Image (cartoon, coloured by chain):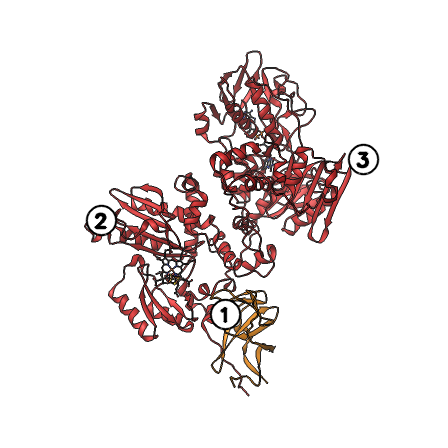
Chain colours: A orange, B red
């Protein structure tokens, strides 16, 4: 398990997502406002749509391809009502620098 | 008839419905034909154009052979000679005379009141004067905290003035509200940014020819660049009084609207009946009906005064009052108050009948209470559910309880029977069309709920236009939202969501609100990329694999070898997966990576074709006179010009256009949102065509001679569609919902100032619009295209 320093929070505008690539693995990182950030795999559980390009609605994001809605706090798809989820990663901000915690066993390392 | 105002002309309308042999002449001292005085507040607030107020235009008087003398003030009635004298020297004989002179603002005894920037608020000219005087930052003082004063205050504030309302009494609207309601109202008014000074008496206005400040009896002085007097009204009874008719405050009439001289009748705000005078229109319509029957010799029930409802016409601020408003002995009170939200409801009940209602902060149930009033409904069985309706089992019930002859719209005197007749005979099926055909609900708006229910219950193909709400996050219709955005001066999506919505929004409302704030402020708004669909953030169309497509603008479908070479180079340089000719005479570069987009735009050096957005797409053209042996019009030149005039603008849904050089229509102009079809010696401008999910032949908007006229007609429709369509409503749905007749009346056949207004707003938006692909030079925008990589090392 390890924390990876990504970049300054200024690169994540309010209520938008950005694509973060870590060794060819794509994450979608969101600024949800009030100092809250979230990171998930940048692949919609439906057909792999780029979640970083979705519209942020509260703590959820709506996939730009077919409108599936993912809860960024849990990673669960909340619309349609279907039991699938995307992987979530812990995020922390220190001195304006955003870091993401990667699981040790993650296949990408 | 002396007086060409709302009550008098409503009476004339009723006279025309009855068989009669009257030869009618009307004198009005204002220079306008009959107009809707109630809407002056909306004109001041900028919600409506001053030219849109006419109830009956000059042609109506002509058609009905009513003599009309405008700008003539009647100065005397000679009852012996049976003549009236005008200030133009005219002398007119009468057999029967109707006095309908309305009322005038009360001018309080304040020293120095006659200065040029001191206004009253009664007529269209007053309103125009106020609009001309209102400047950004000007300090306006409104004397009078009644409905009129508050509406004037809000209107001036929306025009940029800093406004103070001065009220003699301690509370606002003290003739309609109790102290608690008035307190909530004051909070809300102050929240809007209007200052309230209560319990003050104005003493003098300072300044030479123009006012500069107002002094109070307690010695206080406040600066003022504009002063509005809204301290009440007094009946215009002096003509009657001078002629020796029995008068009190008003001209005294009996239940048949007769004055003390049997040949002279009176109605409207100039009258007094049973000691009562009026300041609201609803009972005056009843007077008009009675007088019309009396004067044409038809039997009728005498006039009876009924409770009129007063509604404050400030968008976003619900205040409603009808009947009694103060507790008294023998009156039961039912109350609800949510102080933090400023919601207050009070019903006054006597003998199980409603005798008064006061609503602040939420007047959504006002029509239910008005029905109880009108029907004198026995409330005994409802005593457990007076303030909150029982869940309805039969939605039609409320409507079924209204009698046919009853007035639904008090402001314009429209009965239930008239509404039902319009639904049955004219196929009216939406609120918009109901307003058009019957004028119901075009006054203060308190009957809108009842009109909706009536439509729902009666119209077979009811369309809930006013009811269609955007979504659950902001449960209002597009029209309503446009009003709120304009009047509350909201310039960003988030502000609308914070004030009127759930603060978050969803994928449906955020793009819709983005469009609405843009169009309301003609581009002068605060753009929020997070509220836009990805296509509008990166100005390209997202594809199934997350890559994007690039379609540059190729105006009129005309390209060149240089352009083609550039496109070819870009396609090679960026490994574009496919180059394709689109269905719209342009070229598509498909399968592009997001991060390459700005570089591709730069290399192409061409503007965006906006193929990814709800905006102006293309103008498809045919070769026309430049090459075709059948061409009668230069379709290419006209098409390119059309595209230049509208490109870079956003629309409720995509807008596709075409220009054809002759009726063979090779560019398929008759299945486009806007099409120009060349004819020998003229252009046909057609709108609302489609050949997508469904196929629809466009409707003819107008036929004109010159290309410039054709482009102008297209512009009028285009801007009208931009301002009035619901978000995601294609022109083919829009024209069917509104009907071409209305669209023509509001665009190509509209009064010159209305047309000018549309074109000016289009021009303003166009001035602020730019090629979206120039965003590549915008620093704040660059982040859209980057992909971020870790700064720190991985362990
Ligand atoms: C590229 C193009 C097809 C082509 O290869 O020729 C195209 C591609 C798409 N069309 Fe189209 N339409 C294209 C011409 C048309 C035409 C023909 C025309 O413009 O003359 C029509 C019929 C006319 C019309 O618009 O009504 C057309 C009717 C639609 C519709 C149905 C609209 C309707 O209300 O009936 C949609 C769906 C929608 O808008 O809701 C649509 C939606 C789409 C979208 C944007 C779907 C989407 O949201 O991703 C497609 C993008 C595909 C992609 O991956 O880039 N496209 N589409 C054409 C681009 C034209 C251009 O240069 O801008
Ligand atoms: C800004 C504003 C907002 C209002 N809002 C509402 C509302 O929301 N709800 C509501 O019910 N009511 C409202 N009213 C009141 C409503 O407009 C009046 O009740 C209604 O117009 C009265 O009709 P009337 O015909 O009696 O008088 P008017 O409409 O005033 O008509 C009288 C006409 O006679 C003319 N006249 C007077 N003397 C002479 C003369 N000697 N010779 C020739 N012509 C003469 C006047 O100039 C005027 O044009 C509002 C009024 C104003 C000013
Ligand atoms: S018709 Fe249009 S929307 Fe449908 S697949 Fe083809 S390009 Fe896509
Ligand atoms: S891929 Fe996300 S909704 Fe289809």
Answer yes or no: are tags 1 and 2 on the same subunit: no
Q: Can you give x and y, in whole percent of width and height, for residue A81 in the image?
A: 57, 65
Q: Give the vertical position of B559 relative to B200 (above or below).
A: below
Viewer-proximal residue among B206 and B375 = B375
Query: Outermost residue toward the left?
Result: B629
- Is the shortest distance between ligand 4 and the CB of mark 1 under 8 Å? yes
Q: CA distance from mark 1 to mark 2?
A: 52 Å
Whether tag 3 and tag 2 are in contact, CB under 8 A, the answer is no
Residue for badge 2: B631
Which comes before the other along the chain, label 3 or label 2?
3
Marks 1 and 3 on same chain? no
Label 2 Cα crowd, 10 Å radius (few <14 / some 14-19 / many 20+): many
Numbered disc in front, either 1 or 2: 1
Q: Is residue B205 visible?
A: no
Disc 2 chain ID: B
Residues at discs 3 and 2 both on one chain: yes
């Amino acid at each position: 398990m390890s924390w990876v320093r990504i970049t300054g929070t200024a690169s994540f505008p309010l209520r938008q997502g950005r694509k973060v690539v870590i060794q060819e693995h794509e994450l979608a990182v969101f600024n949800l406002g009030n100092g809250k950030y979230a990171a998930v795999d940048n692949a919609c559980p439906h057909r792999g749509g780029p979640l970083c390009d979705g519209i942020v609605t509260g703590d959820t994001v709506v996939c730009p391809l077919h409108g599936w809605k993912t809860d960024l706090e849990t990673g669960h798809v909340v619309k349609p009502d279907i039991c699938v989820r995307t992987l979530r990663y812990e995020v922390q901000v220190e001195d304006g620098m955003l870091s993401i915690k990667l699981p040790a066993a993650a296949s990408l390392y | 008839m002396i007086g060409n105002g709302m009550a008098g002309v409503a009476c004339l309308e009723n006279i025309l419905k009855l068989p009669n042999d009257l030869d009618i002449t009307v004198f009005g001292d204002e220079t306008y034909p009959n107009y809707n005085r109630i809407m002056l507040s909306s004109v001041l607030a900028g919600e409506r154009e001053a030219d849109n107020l006419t109830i009956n235009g000059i042609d109506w008087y002509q058609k009905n052979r009513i003599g009309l003398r405008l700008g003539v003030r009647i100065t005397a009635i000679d009852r012996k000679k049976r003549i009236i004298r005008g200030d133009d020297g005219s002398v007119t004989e009468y057999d029967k005379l109707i006095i309908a002179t309305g009322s005038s603002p009360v001018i309080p005894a304040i020293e120095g009141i006659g200065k040029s920037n001191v206004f009253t608020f009664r007529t269209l000219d007053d309103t125009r004067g106020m609009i001309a005087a209102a400047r950004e930052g000007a300090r306006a003082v409104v004397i009078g905290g009644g409905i009129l004063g508050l509406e004037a205050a809000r209107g001036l504030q929306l025009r940029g003035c800093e406004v103070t309302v001065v009220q003699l009494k301690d509370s606002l609207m003290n003739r309609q509200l109790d102290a608690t309601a008035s307190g909530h109202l004051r909070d809300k008014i102050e929240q809007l940014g209007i200052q309230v000074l209560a319990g003050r008496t104005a003493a003098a206005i300072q300044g030479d020819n123009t006012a500069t400040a107002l002094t109070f009896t307690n010695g206080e002085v406040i600066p003022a660049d504009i002063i509005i007097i809204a301290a009440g009204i007094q009946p215009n009874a002096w003509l009657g009084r001078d002629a020796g008719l029995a008068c009190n405050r008003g001209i005294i009439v009996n239940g048949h609207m007769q004055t003390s001289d049997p040949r002279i009748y009176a109605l409207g705000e100039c009258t007094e009946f049973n000691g009562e005078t009026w300041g609201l229109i609803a009972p005056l319509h009843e007077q008009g009906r009675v007088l019309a029957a009396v004067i044409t010799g038809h039997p009728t029930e005498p006039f009876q005064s009924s409770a009129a409802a007063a509604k404050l016409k400030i968008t976003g601020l619900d205040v409603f009052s009808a009947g009694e408003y103060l507790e008294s002995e023998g009156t039961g009170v039912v109350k609800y108050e949510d102080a933090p939200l400023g919601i207050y409801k009070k019903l006054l009940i006597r003998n199980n009948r409603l005798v008064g209602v006061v609503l602040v902060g939420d007047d959504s149930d006002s029509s239910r209470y008005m029905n109880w009033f009108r029907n004198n409904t026995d409330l005994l069985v409802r005593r457990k559910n007076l303030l909150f309706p029982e869940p309805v089992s039969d939605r039609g019930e409320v409507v079924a309880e209204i009698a046919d002859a009853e007035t639904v719209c008090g402001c314009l005197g429209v009965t239930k029977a008239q509404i039902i007749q319009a639904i049955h005979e004219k196929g009216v099926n939406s609120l918009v069309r109901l307003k058009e055909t019957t004028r119901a609900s075009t006054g203060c708006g308190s009957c809108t709920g009842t009109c909706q229910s009536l439509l729902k219950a009666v119209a077979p193909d009811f369309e809930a236009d006013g009811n269609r709400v955007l979504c659950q996050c902001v449960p209002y219709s597009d029209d309503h939202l446009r009003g709120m955005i304009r009047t509350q001066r909201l310039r960003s999506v988030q502000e609308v969501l914070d004030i009127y919505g759930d603060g978050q929004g969803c994928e449906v409302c955020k793009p819709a609100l983005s469009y609405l704030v843009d169009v309301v402020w003609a581009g002068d708004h605060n753009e929020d990329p997070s509220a836009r669909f990805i296509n509008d953030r990166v100005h390209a169309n997202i594809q199934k694999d997350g890559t994007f497509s690039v379609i540059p603008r190729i105006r009129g479908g005309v390209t060149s070898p240089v352009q083609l070479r550039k496109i070819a180079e870009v396609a090679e340089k960026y490994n574009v997966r496919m180059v394709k000719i689109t269905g719209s005479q342009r070229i598509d570069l498909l399968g592009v990576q997001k991060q390459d987009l700005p570089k591709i735009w730069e290399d192409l050096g061409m503007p965006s074709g906006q193929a990814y957005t709800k905006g102006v797409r293309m103008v498809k053209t045919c070769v026309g006179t430049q090459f075709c042996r059948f061409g009668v019009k230069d379709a290419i030149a006209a098409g390119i010009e059309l595209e230049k005039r509208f490109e870079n603008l956003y629309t409720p849904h995509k807008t596709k256009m075409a220009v054809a050089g002759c009726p063979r229509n090779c560019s398929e102009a008759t299945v486009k949102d806007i099409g120009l079809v060349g004819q020998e010696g003229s252009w046909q401008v057609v709108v609302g065509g489609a050949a997508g999910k469904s196929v629809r032949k466009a409707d003819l908007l107008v036929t004109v001679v010159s290309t410039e006229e054709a482009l102008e007609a297209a512009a009028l429709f285009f801007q009208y569609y931009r301002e009035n369509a619901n978000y995601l409503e294609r022109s083919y749905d829009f024209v069917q919902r509104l009907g071409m007749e209305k669209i023509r009346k509001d665009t190509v056949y509209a009064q010159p100032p209305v047309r000018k207004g549309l074109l000016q707003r289009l021009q303003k938006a166009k001035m602020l619009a730019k090629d979206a692909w120039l965003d590549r030079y915008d620093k704040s925008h660059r982040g859209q295209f980057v992909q971020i990589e870790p700064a720190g090392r991985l362990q």
